[in-house]
Amino acid sequence: MVFAPGEKTGNEPEEVRLQKASKQIVQNAILQAVRQVSQESRQRDERDSDDRGGFQLGVGALTKKREKK
């Protein structure tokens, strides 16, 4: 059976349900991607700040002890 564009198939509630499910899947995928990019960005920023000479916990304390002697 072939339907013309815009013609109702009689299964509109099923189509609406599928459209809503598809929309929810896409929204979830986008949200997950944004969270992943945000997390990776934070990790990269933390790694970059450590590479710029930031002290790691404990390393600065050892240096200060050596300076006192």
Image: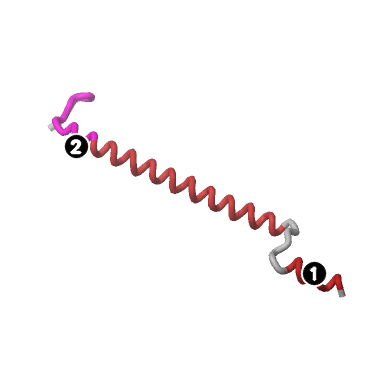
How many numbered marks have been drawn onto this rendered protein structure? 2
User: Horizontal and vertical percent for residue 43?
Assistant: 59, 55
Report the magenta residues as a range.
4-16
- Which of discs 2 and 1 lies nearer the camera? The answer is 1
Q: What secondary structure do most residues of the magenta stretch adopt?
A: loop
Q: Quadrant of residue 30?
A: top left
Q: Quadrant of residue 31?
A: top left
Left/right of residue 22 with respect to residue 6 in the rendered view: right
Asked whether 41 or 54 is in front, the reply is 54
The verdict on residue 12 being magenta is yes
Asked whether 8 or 46 is in front, the reply is 46
Dot 1 falls on a residue whose secondary structure is helix
Dot 2 falls on a residue whose secondary structure is helix
Q: Residue at x 38, y 45 (%)?
A: 28
Residue 62 vertical position relative to residue 28 in the rendered view, above or below: below
Q: Residue at x 49, y 51 (%)?
A: 36
Residue bearing the label numbered 2:
14
